[in-house]
Image (spheres, rainbow, N blue to C red):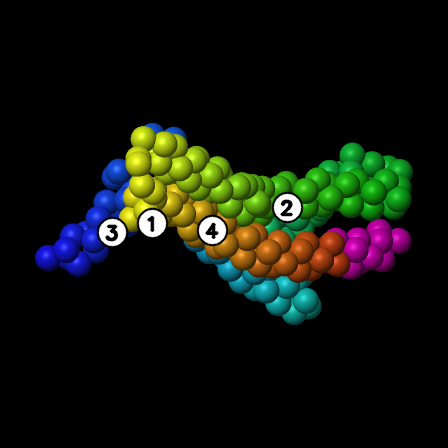
Amino acid sequence: MSTMTVIQDFSIITLIAEASFIVKVVLAILLIASITSWNYIFSKLFAIRKARSQTEIFERDFWSGGNLVELYQQAVANHRASRDKTGALERIFEAGMNEYHKVKAANKTNLDATAMLDGARRAMRASYQREMDLLESHLSFLASVGSVSPYIGLLGTVWGIMNSFRGLINMQQATLAAVAPGIAEALIATAIGLFAAIPAVLAYNRFSHDIDRLAIRFETFIEEFSNILQRQSR
């Protein structure tokens, strides 16, 4: 019976329930941070996979040798129907073609190839920045959770251990059984801090790498498409 009681007293739920107020606040903060980070991890995972797939599809269509005007019209139609129907690279292409045609229409009598090309490149760069901001959204939160959560957990651990040793002041005989529950409750804060931090760090590093790869593909496309527009404007 005594063994059963010890096991029950040292269960995680019991330790959390009997923890001090500060430790409970620390655990609540870490739990909220962990749930939020997992939400961002899954949403970002699907968003990057979708962006990669849409980029590959558009690159295949673009380099298939089709008519650029028809491809632009299709991109505009898809964008008007739903933004989700177009990928990031397709929207960059649409922005460049749209600006190119605007400058060309405004200077019918005196076509300036440099002005048309510069306008298209600026439009693509602006669209590129918007797409990158969208892809990189919430990454800073994952980075913050990964770097701060262990220290928040450590704060709960230190506070719990301090309470355990303060409780020994009124005891005539200090034993391991007297301080063990308090130390165990304190160490839970560190464990949960690491549980929140490790997935956030791994996800941040992975997503940063994937987004950097997409950024390189976007920038390469902008330069290659600019060369195509330069040849057409001659």
Which is more toward the observer, 205 or 7? 7
Q: Nearer the viewer, mark 3 or mark 2?
A: 3
**Residue at point 37%, 45% (across, down):** 183
| Gap between marks 3 and 2 measured at Cα | 46 Å
Under tag 2, what secondary structure? helix
In the picture, the disc for residue 194 is 4
> Within 10 angstroms of label 1, few (less than 14), some, or many (20 or more) residues?
few
Q: Indicate which disc, 1 or 3, sits on the residue closer to the N terminus.
A: 3
Residue 162, compared with residue 5, is above or below; it is above
Q: With 116 as the anchor, is 182 left or right in this view? A: left
Q: Indicate which disc, 1 or 4, sits on the residue closer to the N terminus.
A: 1
Q: Nearer the viewer, mark 2 or mark 1?
A: 1
Q: Label 4 is placed on what type of residue? A: Leu
Report if residue 163 is visible in the image: no
Which is more toward the observer, 182 or 27? 182
| Residue receiving disc 3 | 11
| Residue receiving disc 2 | 132
